[in-house]
Amino acid sequence: DTAVSQTPKYLVTQMGNDKSIKCEQNLGHDTMYWYKQDSKKFLKIMFSYNNKELIINETVPNRFSPKSPDKAHLNLHINSLELGDSAVYFCASSQDFYNQPQHFGDGTRLSIL
Amino acid sequence: KNEVEQSPQNLTAQEGEFITINCSYSVGISALHWLQQHPGGGIVSLFMLSSGKKKHGRLIATINIQEKHSSLHITTSHPRDSAVYICAVPASYNTDKLIFGTGTRLQVFP
């Protein structure tokens, strides 16, 4: 059973479209994260939710909106996609918010045409 | 805000060699993470440590909190260890917002 699963694995779309990436964890963790990995493979935190509450909200354009319907899910919706949004997006989860190992999904490779 | 530096950026080795990857950070932390990113892109958490040393199979991670430095060792490297190894630390002492190093790309040849 996959612990942290993201869908889709690949997403190719045109500039200006709206798209969503879904993330689910079956580990019973309280905290979930979204990370962006750019073309230089540099990872950066975007958002973190603990028990459905937003904890970390980095300097991310407000075209990006996370949604946590329950603590097992953290989806990422992106409006009006731009070329610079092309990246790999990773979802992760941890038992709690502080000082815990994080479990990562396989990533979603987003390509904007 | 914490800054994280890893060295070397790239590393090649022959199978069986002892590997060391280094990570330095600038601000006091509660714990440091070592991650492995496979060529296929998946990321695996290898260690989270706040003091001393941890060992898992052929992997050993050490940390010196006073010197703000950690090392990841692979005692007998194998081609399947080829991956990018990433160090990550909290942005400051009382947060879990992680700051990531730029990674060390390791290639182990048979």
Image: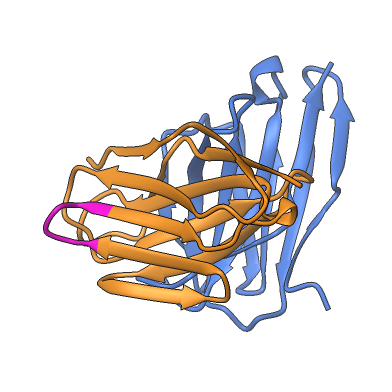
Chain colours: A blue, B orange
x and y percentages locating residue B95 in the rendered image = 28, 59
Image label count: 0
The quarter of the picture where residue A93 lies is bottom right
Whole-percent x and y of residue A76? 67, 48
Residue B5 visible in this rendered orientation of the protein: yes
Front-most of B101 and B64? B64
Quarter of the image with the N terminus of chain B in it: top left
* Lateral position of residue A106 relative to residue B91, left or right: right
Q: Identify the residue at horizontal 86%, vertical 48% (top origin).
A: A8
Q: Which residues are magenta?
A: B64-69
Residue A53 can be seen, yes or no:
no
Give B52 or B93, whichever is nearer the viewer: B52
Q: Is residue B6 above or below residue A24?
A: above
Magenta run includes residue B107:
no
**Residue B91's x, y, as percent?**
29, 48
Asked whether B67 falls inside the magenta stretch, the response is yes
Give the residue drawn at x 18%, y 61%.
B65
For this rendering, which residue is in front, B110 or B95? B110
Q: Is residue B55 left or right of residue A63?
A: left
Residue B92 in the image: x percent, y percent?
A: 22, 52
As drawn, A110 above or below B19? above
Residue found at the very far bottom of the displayed protein = A28
Q: Name the residue located 28 percent from the left edge and 70 percent from the top edge.
A: B50
**Predominant SS of the magenta segment:** loop
Q: Nearer the viewer, residue A61 or B58?
A: B58
Q: Residue furthest left?
A: B66
Residue that appears at 33% across and 65% down: B62
